Structure formats: structure tokens, C-alpha cells
């Protein structure tokens, strides 16, 4: 199982921040981002056997777990968020008085996360 530390997370966050600030992703339309996310899901699905073999050899995860859960859930997650890529809208909020109040959903930065998993053989 791969191990990471705070320095690894800092490097990943710095790379994500650079992509967020200067990468082509932010200049794409929401529809274009959704198409790319679906394309990624298609590629994962197309090469599922390679992923299963990699997962088994590097993480000691049983192939049936990868086949039954890891890959289908990963693909479904990408497809779900690809569908939402161009459906992120703000909302108006009713308040007392002569005011117009609204929310606008927009990305503000990047986050690093370390997840601990337990794998059984």
C-alpha cells in the first residue's frame, strides 16, 4: 500500500493550485468539462481489466472487490459529476426588506485529503 506524508500532500495541492490558477480547465465551458469527465469514465471502463490487474498487484486488493465495487463506483462517480458540470446554478434567497440576496457557487481553491483504507487479502 502506498504511503504519503504531509510533504506529498503539499506537493499535490501545489500542483492542483497551479492547474486551478493557470490550467486550461478553468477556461473551458461547463459543458466541455462534463464531456471530458465522461470521456475519462469511458477510458476507465474500456481499460477496466488493466486497472483490476494494477489494483491487485500494487494494493493487495482482491480482484473481485475491484470488479464489484472500486471500478463501477469510480466510473459512476465520474459520470454523476460530469452530468452536474453544467448544472451548477446560484439561488435567490428571500429576505425581509428591499434587498436582493443570492448565492453564486464557484470554486475557490484546492484541498488535500489523506484517506486511510483497510485492505484485506
Image: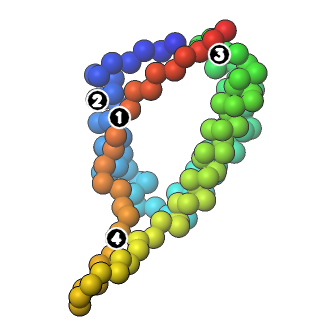
Distance Cα–Cα, label 4 vs label 1: 25 Å
116 left or right of 102? right
Q: List the residue tagged with mark 4.
A: 103
Mark 2 vs mark 3: which is more N-terminal?
A: 2
Mark 2 lies on a secondary structure that is: helix
Distance Cα–Cα, label 2 vs label 1: 7 Å
- In contact (CB < 8 Å): disc 3 and disc 4: no
* In this view, 104 is above or below 67: below
- In contact (CB < 8 Å): disc 2 and disc 3: no
88 left or right of 54? left
Distance Cα–Cα, label 2 vs label 4: 31 Å
Q: Residues within 10 Å of mark 3 (few under 14, many from 20)?
A: many
* In this view, 73 is above or below 65: below
Judge depth for marks 2 and 3 and give the one in front: 3
Q: Residues within 10 Å of mark 4 (few under 14, many from 20)?
A: few
Q: How far from the left and from the top, in percent, is residue 44?
A: 67, 37
63 left or right of 30? right
Q: Residue at x 48, y 66 (%)?
A: 88
The extreme front residue here reads: 96
Mark 1 lies on a secondary structure that is: loop
Q: List the residue tagged with mark 1.
A: 112
Q: How far from the left and from the top, in percent, is residue 75?
A: 66, 42
Q: List the residue tagged with mark 2.
A: 10
Q: List the residue tagged with mark 3.
A: 61
Distance Cα–Cα, label 3 vs label 4: 43 Å
Residue 36 shows in the view: no
Mark 3 lies on a secondary structure that is: loop
Judge depth for marks 4 and 1 and give the one in front: 4
Q: How far from the left and from the top, in percent, is residue 90?
A: 41, 71
Amino acid at each position: 500500500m502506498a504511503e504519503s506524508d504531509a510533504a506529498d500532500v503539499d506537493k499535490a495541492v501545489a500542483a492542483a493550485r497551479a492547474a486551478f490558477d493557470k490550467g486550461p480547465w478553468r477556461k473551458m465551458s461547463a459543458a466541455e468539462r462534463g464531456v471530458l469527465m465522461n470521456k475519462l469514465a469511458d477510458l476507465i471502463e474500456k481499460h477496466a481489466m488493466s486497472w483490476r490487474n494494477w489494483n491487485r498487484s500494487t494494493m493487495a486488493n482482491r480482484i473481485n472487490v475491484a470488479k464489484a465495487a472500486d471500478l463501477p463506483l469510480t466510473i459512476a462517480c465520474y459520470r454523476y459529476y460530469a452530468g452536474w458540470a453544467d448544472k451548477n446554478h446560484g439561488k435567490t434567497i428571500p429576505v425581509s426588506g428591499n434587498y436582493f440576496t443570492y448565492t453564486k457557487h464557484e470554486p475557490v481553491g484546492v484541498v488535500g485529503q489523506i484517506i486511510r483504507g483497510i485492505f484485506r487479502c
